[in-house]
Amino acid sequence: MTCKQLYEPCDALIHGESSEEMIKNSQKHGMEMAAKGDQDHTKIMAEMRQHMGDPEAVKQWMEKFQNEFDAQPEDI
């Protein structure tokens, strides 16, 4: 899946065998890009942190992402 498919701003490919691994790798990518000064990634990460305080929002996001992950072909 791409960074954009993971609700972030670029087309970098993010790999993972499970949805949990994809989320972990997406977070790592976002932090690396933010550390390089990328303002788009920094903004998205700040928005995501705000939503993390709402358990219902987190649950809905996880369900949506899991469905999208499950729908992806194996080789993405």
Image: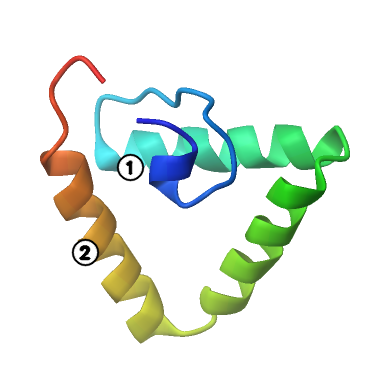
Please identify the quarter of the rendering in which residue 70 is found.
top left
Residue 7, position as x, y percentages in the image: 46, 52
Residue 49, position as x, y percentages in the image: 62, 68
Q: For this view, does 20 lie left or right of residue 64?
A: right
According to the picture, the residue beneath numbered tag 1 turns out to be 20
Near mark 2 (Cα within 10 A), the count class, few <14, some 14-19 or many ≥20, is few
Q: The C terminus lies in which quarter of the figure? A: top left
**Residue at 47 percent of width and 85 percent of height:** 54
According to the picture, the residue beneath numbered tag 2 turns out to be 63
Label 1 sits on a secondary structure element that is helix
Q: Amino acid at mark 2?
A: Glu
Labels 2, 1: front one: 2
Q: For this view, does 36 lie left or right of residue 30?
A: right
Q: Nearer the viewer, residue 14 or 39?
A: 39
Residue 8, position as x, y percentages in the image: 54, 48
**Residue at 49 percent of width and 37 percent of height:** 3
Label 2 sits on a secondary structure element that is helix
